[in-house]
Amino acid sequence: MPVSEPIMATESDPGAGDLVKRHRLSTRLWHWLNVVTLAVMLMSGLMIFNAHPRLYWGHYGANADPAWFEIGSTENTGFIQAGPLRVETTGVLGHWTDQDAKIQRRAFPYWITIPSRYSLADARLWHLAFAWVLGVSLLVYMVISLVNRHFKRDLTISRAEIRPAHVWADVKDHARLRFPTGAAALRYNILQKLAYASVLFVMLPLIIFTGLAMSPAIDSGWSWLLDIFGGRQSARSLHFIAMVALVGFFFVHIAMVVLAGPINELRSMISGYYRLPGERPEPVIEEVAP
């Protein structure tokens, strides 16, 4: 067999260097659909936020009411304010230059919103259209994952894994960039399980249901949603917080992909096949003669 030909490992004894099946088709399709869906929803959502860049708790909120979070501007500066904390963001948020070289005093700049020019109506159309894609695809993915036992096999957390000593050991391994090798790389560690479970069962459902709670049409039939979240403004705040959490997860996820080997990781999410990594060589420390 030529050296360049991939070795298809058997399920019984995969080892470092073997090319093995890692992701099912349903996982790969849902992953890439989410890349597009969440990007469009984020960018259109930021345009919607531009219409009133202030967040409140409770049922009501308007310009005269105290906001717990705000992206605003003065005559010459932009700022973010969260409670008493205020950070200047001139040139990026609140006060920036548009594509026509004109100063704008909206929260988020044109290059990160859909549409790029201010239009609340168009942003809502984009946001609601892809909200359906997000909700339906999440439901389908969860049903498939129950049927093919993906949740039970890959995301179930054992008592041993949740022990503080075990979690702390995984945290230290990640901080030192010590990633699993061989067959161990096919199993999710406790940090991955916690992260993916929080996205699937907390962040995405929270995004969906707080979005529904902000809809007057939904509230007329499901008024209990507003009671659960403590009012429309609280739902809006929680919607924004969940979005920030998802963006944070995205950046950590990308960082881990790059550090673990982007080509191998991307191949596994496109083709489903993953080459099991081997042990990384320890750095050689040369002795310096006196």
Image (spheres, rainbow, N blue to C red):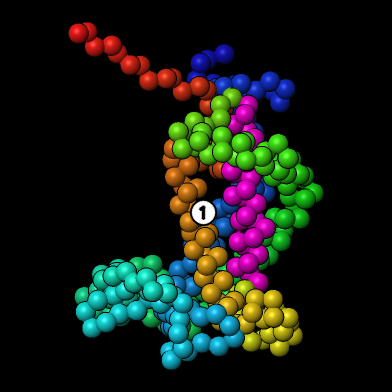
**Rendered view: 167 above or below 93:** above
Q: Residue at x 46, y 77 (%)?
A: 68
**Rendered view: 154 above or below 196:** above
191 inside magenta stretch: yes
Q: Which contiguous range is marked in magenta?
A: 183-209
Q: Residue at x 19, y 8 (%)?
A: 290
The residue at the far bottom in this view is: 64
Task: Name the image quarter holding the N terminus.
Answer: top right
Residue 282 lies, in percent from the top left, at 42, 20
**Is residue 273 visible in the rendered structure shown here?**
no
Residue 51 lies, in percent from the top left, at 43, 83
Q: Is residue 212 left or right of residue 78?
A: right
Q: Is residue 289 left or right of residue 34?
A: left
Q: Residue at x 51, y 87 (%)?
A: 61
**Is residue 86 visible in the rendered structure shown here?**
yes
Q: Residue at x 72, y 55 (%)?
A: 142
Q: Is residue 14 left or right of residue 285?
A: right
The residue indicated by pointer 1 is: 249
Amino acid type, callout 1: Phe
Residue 155 lies, in percent from the top left, at 69, 45
189 inside magenta stretch: yes
Task: Say which of 10 and 155 sits in front.
Answer: 155
- For label 1, count other residues whose C-alpha is less than 10 Å away and answer few (under 14), some (14-19) or many (20+): some
Task: Say which of 236 and 21 sits in front.
Answer: 236
Residue 251 lies, in percent from the top left, at 45, 52
| SS majority, magenta | helix
Q: Is residue 71 left or right of residue 214?
A: left
